[in-house]
Amino acid sequence: MTEIAVVYHSTTGTTKRLAQAVHVGAGGVAGARASLHAIVGDDIREGRFSNNALFAQLDAADAIIFGSPTFMGGPSAQLKAFLDATVSRWVTRAWANKLAAAFTVSATPSGDKLNTLTSIAVTAMQLGMIWVGVEETTRDPSAPNRLSVYMGAAGQADYGTNPPGVVAADLRTGELLGARVAKLALRLRANP
């Protein structure tokens, strides 16, 4: 079974909703199993991320999809603490040749989401991971990848719902990204 891990941080719940969509997309591919992992407050001690059980699960995955809200044009401090802690995987090259992808949510259509995705992608590439972006393209404001972000899945929060949600087309973009990562991971596993 090909393992796809979705690891994310969320504060208002909107990034969690996009994480769930990515998880559904990845888990919906025959031969793939997806797991969902939230970074929580107890994982951060004195500003540093520490959760060996989570790292063990991620070590066993074929692909890791990272998620963060975009705060002030970058990833949340909690996801950044997690990414900084991957230095132990960098030293040992433990995640080299795993697939990587990312998703993010902010309140506005842009919100500088591309900077968040780029920041995560740079870390993944330093770890020797293989980056997967979004395949879909459209000019239709109600279709997947309506925001035309190809580095990863970008979502806009919908604060008109209670609790706050994510624009439906952006949730679909997340599902499609999850499915694409799972399909590519299956292909890599079959042809190492």
Image (tube, helix red, strand yellow):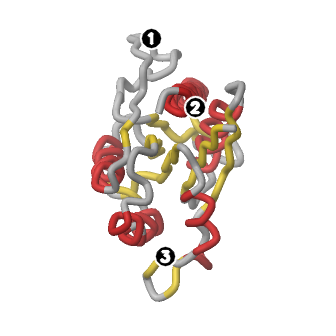
* Residue 39 can be seen, yes or no: yes
Task: State the image coordinates of residue 17 (x, y, percent, origin top left).
Answer: 64, 44
Categorize mark 2 by other alpha carbons within 10 Å: few (<14), some (14-19), many (20+): many
Q: Which residue type does callout 2 highlight?
A: Ala
- Cα separation, mark 3 vs mark 2, equals 27 Å
Q: What element carries label 3?
A: strand
**x%, y% of residue 139?**
38, 11
Identify whether 192 is placed above or below 55.
above
The image position of residue 178, as x and y in percent, is 57, 33
Task: Locate residue 149: give its quadrant.
Answer: top left
- Residue closer to the observer: 73 or 172: 172
> Where does residue 44 sit, x and y in percent of width and height?
52, 79
User: Position of 10 compared to 108: left or right?
Assistant: right
Task: Pick whichever of labels 3 and 2 is earlier in the sequence.
Answer: 3
Pointer 2 residue: 182
Please state which of residues 164 and 30 is positioned toward the viewer in this rendering: 30
For discs 3 and 2, the disc positioned in front in the rendered view: 2
What residue sits right under mark 3 in the picture? 49
Q: In this view, does 39 lie above or below 171?
A: below
Secondary structure under badge 1?
loop
Label 1 sits on what residue type? Asp
Q: Which residue carries the number 1 mark?
A: 140
Type of amino acid at the residue the image marks with label 3: Phe
The numbered mark, 1 or 3, whose residue comes first in the sequence reads 3
Residue 73 visible within the image: no
Q: Which residue does the image show at 65% across and 40% down from the upper left?
A: 23
**Residue at x 45% of width, y 23% of height:** 145
Q: Quadrant of the N terminus?
A: top right
Whole-angstrom CA distance, mark 1 to mark 3, is 40 Å
